[in-house]
Image (tube, rainbow, N blue to C red):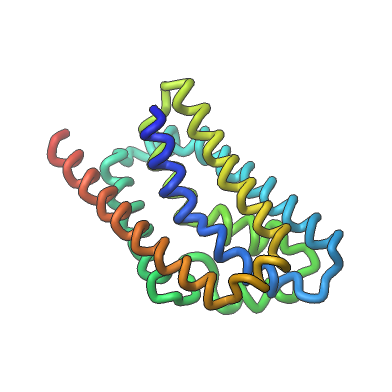
Amino acid sequence: MIEQLVKFFVVFFVVVEPISLIPLFAGLTHGASGGYKKKMAGKAAAIALGICVLFALVGAKFLQIMGISLSSFRIAGGTLLFLIALEMVFARTSGTRSTTTEREESKKREDISVFPLAFPFIAGPGALATILLTAGEVWGKPALFAGFLAVVALVLIICWALMLATPRLMKVLGVTGANVISRLSGVILAALAVQFIVDGIRGSFLT
């Protein structure tokens, strides 16, 4: 159980990529008051948690209703995570999270907590795919499912803490430092994504 939760923590942490939120949050809240930054960070983390919990509770059932096997979703989810990993390794602006038009729109919004912070940057497609993949495996195991939700909450608490500490962290890391960490995380995510695809292919042939 501990091994499964640790593995999920690593995958979910890398997919959510809290470090990448530091330069993003700094840019979106540039010149804003400390109170505004705290409010946006808290709301974004809370809304992202709500989205993730909702997907964890109904995602597996939705796949069942749609007639999508967990093995098929592992292949699809693994492919999506691999694409995200490539963007992380090459330090490209993620097209899987937002388009250029959406990024421009976000700069003009007074409330950035829901869009673009909570969705698609924190609870984005990669994070939700990871939750669906894991929820399907732990569904029906109350203790493991509770641990799974606790890990989700822990990662989002880390996101919230990093957003609050953004001014100090930007002085230490800078954009270059954040990109270096992102690239290293991308390599790990690529390997995990391939494992998801392999497991999905293996499961498809065995069933």
Query: Would you identify the image quadrant in which residue 32 lies?
Result: bottom right
Residue 84 percent across, percent down from the top left: 40, 64
The N terminus appears in which quarter of the rendering? Answer: top left
Q: Residue at x 57, y 38 (%)?
A: 53
Q: Residue furthest left?
A: 205
Query: Would you identify the image quadrant in which residue 2 lies?
Result: top left
The answer to whether one can see residue 95 in this image is no
Q: Residue at x 60, y 78 (%)?
A: 101
The answer to whether one can see residue 9 in this image is yes
As displayed, is residue 60 above or below residue 103? above
Q: Residue at x 64, y 46 (%)?
A: 157
Q: Residue at x 35, y 58 (%)?
A: 188
43 vs 79, left or right, is right
As displayed, is residue 40 above or below residue 50? below
The C terminus appears in which quarter of the rendering? Answer: top left
Residue 191 percent across, percent down from the top left: 29, 56
Q: Residue furthest front?
A: 172
166 vs 55, left or right, is right
46 vs 124, left or right, is right
Judge by depth and name the residue closer to the eye, 28 or 71.
28
As displayed, is residue 94 above or below residue 137? below
Judge by depth and name the residue closer to the eye, 60 or 11.
11
Residue 146 percent across, percent down from the top left: 52, 27
Residue 15 percent across, percent down from the top left: 46, 55
